[in-house]
Image: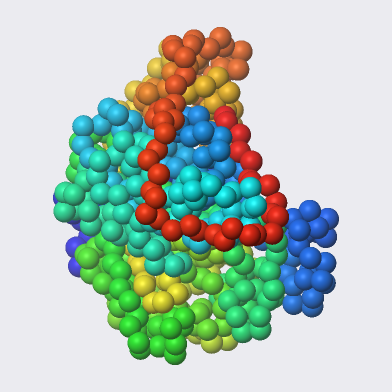
Amino acid sequence: MTITLDPTSTIAIIGLACRFPGASDATQFWHNLRHGVESISCLDTDTLDQMGVAEARYQQENFVPAEPLLAGIDQFDAAYFGYSPREAQLLAPQQRIFLQCAVTALENAGYDPEQFAGSIGVYAGMGLSTYLLFNLLNNAGLDSAEDSDTIMLGNDKDFLATRVAYHLNLNGPALTTQTGCSTALVNTHLACDALLSYQCDIALAGGVSVAVPQSAGYLHQQGGITSADGHCRPFDAAGDGTVFGSGVGIVVLKRLEEAQADGDTILAVIRGSAINNDGALKLGYTAPSVDGQAQVIAQAQRVAGISAETVSFIETHGTATQLGDPIEFEALHQVFEASDAAPQACALGAVKSNIGHLDAAAGAAGLIKTILALQHKQIPPTLHFEQPNPALDLDNSPFYVPTELQDWHNGVSPRRAGVSSFGIGGTNAHIVLEEAPTIESTGQTSDQPQLIVLSARTPSALETVTDNLQGFLATEGAENAEKETLQLCNSATAASLTELSGAANSTSQPRNPATSQPRNLATPQPRNPATPQPRLTSQPRLYPANRPKSPPLSPFCGC
């Protein structure tokens, strides 16, 4: 099998953005991963009462007061995207958050769609709109046909990708694809295919899932998919299920050859990917399949042109169920035993042990975790692993479960990883990642002050950008952040209208931008001014006329 990288058939990951339980961005997410933080909250009775959970429910023996919470689901910069306050209230939090994350992802990649000459595609998916079910449909104040149309467009999965394309003026393919738990990774595969067939020049790919209300807990069912105590223990003897939470993750993709030519920052590369379906060769519709999973992993490795023994980390689907873990392990074992893989040479990761199961965003969480691990050359711990599931023969396999942070050493091959995501219904996805190609450093440094330019659409948003930069520098330090900081700050928000600047001898010692006087270039305007939209009168009413009184609509705030 080939070891060299072919830039004409390889995809570069040039940017990303995410919001996960306990992490507002990728920097905080990596901090949590490397320190073994579990971001699954235990809910007290006061919180449950405030969320309207009936006491009779949470007093049940099988009630589990746990949930991976996503902060800020009620916050949205409506004016930036041209929404009226009323429209923003009727828009599902999943749609709001994914839209904001798409902007952040492109900024992270250093691209402004208005200035990019090529086409940009969007491949997205989302979870069920529980905001529609539990808030809007029961709200007695929503009776007009206009509200009905806005609710339908703002909550239906069909309109996720096209909403992003409209607001960011993206003219590549805009596809919303749904495959259950594997949605985000399947969308990443589809985006790679679109790039390699020149349907677009840059692609956004990812998924989002936001449960409304949060902080509600759940009822555990013996033998089901949820954990009995609110902890997810992949591959452990005590593993009995997962915990469902909320999150969003998006990656920005580009053909490697062009990314290198354009001087893009390359976070990692996708050597190959594959998707398939289990068909009927399994216990039931919701059950996983050894054959289906083994086939998709082997196919992705064939597409990548690599052999299994060169892969030293697998980010697994890892639901910690008594049925799922042994099937996933056996599928991996079948693929790796056909190679020359050494015993205990490949680590098994499972981000669900940190943040739970994020439904349509689950694959994005695993993918982004692995990208960060490749960047930092470290393998984070898989939490709660003490004794292996007796159905797994770990000692006689190429695999081990890391229980602490470890350096990621590589041999002859570059660091390589696989990421798996398997959906209920049998649609499987696997992606082969490789560390970014080495870039020769010029070795030139300068003691001269460097100009750092920060910009945003509004003064309050500029304060947020400034705080984020300070936090990034405090976390990463000058050694890791200097080049990236200067490039990103001076290119990422070219379309913004308010900016400030500061000088620094190094990025570890910047002049505090908070003390600088911002220079307002223009009065901030929304990207798409709010204009009356035609009503889709052919669409059916979404709810009956007589409904019980409901809680108020979810608030939002402009930044």
Q: Is residue 422 above or below residue 547?
A: below
The front one of 279 and 264 is 279
Quadrant location, the C terminus:
top right
Q: Position of residue 68 (x, y in %)?
A: 64, 58
Quadrant location, the N terminus:
bottom left
Q: Position of residue 361 (x, y in %)?
A: 47, 58
Name the residue: 18% across, 49% down: 199
The front one of 309 and 320 is 320
Name the residue: 44% across, 11% down: 521
Q: Is residue 265 left or right of residue 447?
A: left
The front one of 490 and 1 is 490
Q: Is residue 479 above or below residue 174?
A: above
Name the residue: 30% across, 73% down: 276
The answer to whether residue 208 is seen in the rendering is no
Determine which quarter of the picture holds residue 312. bottom left
Q: Is residue 449 above or below residue 302?
A: above
Determine which quarter of the picture holds residue 264. top left
